[in-house]
Image: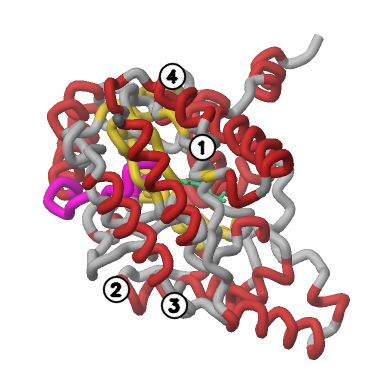
């Protein structure tokens, strides 16, 4: 007898992947320039030159045995030290290398942390709209997944709704800012209100309620926006970070968990994260990319192409009559579906080879997500099609 939950998850099509695969088939049939694929969050700007140069230099100058060998499970000393120093310098947080666990991206960082904080009957809250994988990650970690809707106009977390959802079983709240799919950057005053609420409830229930801060888009912000660093606002924060988007390295699988020393049971929590990773077969993150990232720790992406796309798409769509919140971060636009019938709209869009992701997997209905990590020409060619669709 197979594990039926695992089977069901493996057999269930991912809405985003399905749209993407359809786009690939259409592109083969009709040509790339006839398909407008806004379905995926695959970075469209190249990794900084420094990363590729570091990889070349490492391969040319270092011992192959060392470069391709295992590092320790928690990551190479070199990268853990570089991350801790980077966090100290940028955010003033007293990070130390032994509080950093290097993972194969944000996804396994999240599964390890979720499992580390999960207890029988526990609940984990996520602010909707949310990254769809939070649901299976949480359910498989043994906690119950509880979505709490953000404000539908601004996509800022709704503290009153959160207060109603938190109870004695709540172990953690996942915060993702800049947000996938809304592009919202959560405001500092809202995050401070959440911190105060969690502190009060943790005291009342006699156990910590952790914030799991999922930050793959931390560096992707526009117009000088600042992303508050959550451990500085709330002591029981655990950070899940990834270089997938910030250095355009999603296929290299590299990220980390940071368990600040101020978090309740910090050392035990760190060891539980390491134990969960081990249970899922984590041995170490790929060694070559650990080395390269350690050398490029201060590299930042050139966001001008995303920013240009963001303005072009946002302005083009709002001028045509669509409504959406102007995104301050990440590379997504979350657009209200005209007529609110998502199925009908995305089917009509698909017939015109315009590929969007309906919002249901993100825990909200009546919207669709566009990933503007695409060539500028794709947006220019797609805007007239969007206009036709709203008529
Ligand atoms: N969290 C969010 C909000 C994401 O959007 C993604 C990927 O798109 C991930 C986590 C997973 O990132 P990674 O590729 O680093 O595993």
Label 2 to label 3: alpha-carbon separation = 10 Å
The answer to whether residue 318 is above or below residue 93 is above
Residue shown at 82%/68% (left/top)? 69
Residue shown at 66%/36% (left/top)? 21
The residue that label 3 is drawn on is 85
Percent across and percent down for residue 201 are: 19, 32
Tag nearer the camera, 4 or 3: 4
Badge 4 local density, few (<14 within 10 Å), some, or many (20+)?
A: some
Secondary element type, mark 4: helix
First in sequence, mark 4 or 2: give its number: 2
Magenta-drawn stretch contains 182: yes
The residue that label 1 is drawn on is 355
Secondary element type, mark 1: strand
Label 1 to label 4: alpha-carbon separation = 12 Å
The numbered disc on residue 92 is: 2
First in sequence, mark 4 or 3: give its number: 3
The residue that label 4 is drawn on is 343
First in sequence, mark 2 or 3: give its number: 3
The answer to whether residue 389 is above or below residue 182 is above
Label 1 to label 3: alpha-carbon separation = 42 Å
């Amino acid at each position: 007898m197979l594990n039926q939950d695992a089977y069901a998850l493996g057999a269930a099509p991912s809405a985003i992947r399905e749209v993407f695969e359809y786009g690939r088939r259409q592109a083969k049939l009709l040509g790339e320039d006839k398909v407008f694929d806004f379905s995926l969050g695959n970075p469209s700007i190249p990794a900084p030159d420094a990363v590729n140069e570091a990889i070349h230099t490492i391969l040319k100058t270092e011992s192959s045995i060392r470069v391709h060998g295992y590092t320790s499970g928690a990551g190479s000393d070199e990268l853990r030290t570089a991350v801790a120093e980077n966090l100290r310098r940028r955010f003033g947080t007293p990070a130390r290398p032994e509080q950093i666990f290097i993972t194969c991206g944000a996804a396994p960082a999240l599964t390890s942390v979720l499992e580390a904080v999960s207890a029988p009957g526990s609940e984990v809250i996520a602010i909707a709209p949310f990254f769809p994988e939070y649901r299976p990650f949480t359910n498989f970690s043994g906690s119950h997944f509880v979505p709490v809707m953000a404000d539908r106009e601004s996509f800022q977390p709704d503290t009153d709704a959160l207060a109603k959802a938190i109870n004695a079983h709540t172990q953690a709240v996942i915060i993702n800012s800049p947000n996938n799919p809304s592009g919202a950057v959560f405001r500092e005053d809202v995050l401070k209100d959440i911190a105060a609420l969690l502190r009060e409830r943790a005291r009342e229930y006699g156990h910590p309620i952790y914030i799991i801060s999922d930050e793959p888009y931390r560096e992707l912000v526009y117009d000088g926006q600042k992303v508050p660093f959550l451990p500085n606002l709330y002591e029981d924060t655990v950070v899940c970070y990834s270089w997938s988007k910030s250095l355009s390295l999603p296929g290299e699988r590299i990220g980390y968990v940071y368990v600040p020393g101020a978090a309740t049971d910090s050392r035990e929590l760190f060891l539980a994260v390491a134990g969960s990773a081990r249970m899922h077969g984590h041995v170490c993150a790929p060694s070559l990319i650990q080395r390269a990232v350690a050398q490029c720790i201060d590299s930042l992406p050139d966001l001008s192409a995303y920013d240009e796309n963001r303005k072009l798409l946002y302005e083009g769509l709002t001028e045509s009559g669509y409504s959406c919140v102007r995104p301050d971060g990440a590379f997504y636009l979350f657009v209200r579906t005209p007529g609110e019938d998502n199925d009908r709209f995305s089917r009509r869009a698909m017939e015109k080879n315009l590929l969007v992701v309906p919002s249901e997997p993100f825990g909200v209905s009546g919207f669709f997500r566009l990933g503007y990590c695409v060539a500028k020409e794709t947006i220019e060619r797609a805007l007239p099609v969007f206009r036709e669709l709203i008529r």
